[in-house]
Amino acid sequence: MPTFSTADPDAGDSFAYEIVPAPESTGIAMFTIQGDTLRTAGPLNYEAGPSYSLTIRATDRGGLSTTSVFTVVATNVTEAPLSI
């Protein structure tokens, strides 16, 4: 899963990242952020949702923030048949 980074004119500033509910966001419950890394709550199922749109907010120590929209794409894999 991806790791976030943010550019800031204040050298050495650190950031907190969070998923923000937004109209374009889908599948928010499927994801969490730990530190600066996006994690899934479980395996992604291509058939249930081939892609997810997430709005991520980065906030620096001074309280200034920026948001960006990211798309996470699930890979369609061949699954073994349950029965023949």
Image: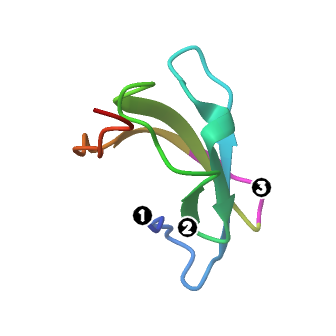
Q: Earlier in the sequence, mark 3 or mark 1?
A: 1
- What secondary structure is found at the residue carrying circle 3? loop
Q: Which structural element holds mark 2?
A: strand
* Type of the residue with mark 3: Gly
State the residue position of label 2: 37
Assess whether mark 1 and mark 3 are in contact (beta carbons under 8 angstroms).
no
Which labelled disc corresponds to residue 2? 1
- Percent from the top left, x then y, of residue 56? 57, 44
Considering only vertical position in the picture, is 19 above or below 34? above
* Marking on residue 63: 3
Image quadrant in which the N terminus is located? bottom left
2 or 3: mark nearer the eye: 2
User: Magenta stretch: residue 64 in it?
Assistant: yes
Q: Is residue 56 left or right of residue 29?
A: left
Nearest the viewer among 74 and 25 is 74
Question: Viewer-nearest of labels 3 and 1?
Answer: 1
Residue at horizontal 55 percent and vertical 67 percent from the top:
37
Q: Which circle's residue, 2 or 1, is located before the other in the chain?
A: 1
- The secondary structure that most of the magenta stretch takes on is loop
Three-letter amino acid code of the residue under disc 1: Pro
Task: Give the mark nearer the N terminus: 2 vs 3.
Answer: 2
Q: Which residues are magenta?
A: 62-66
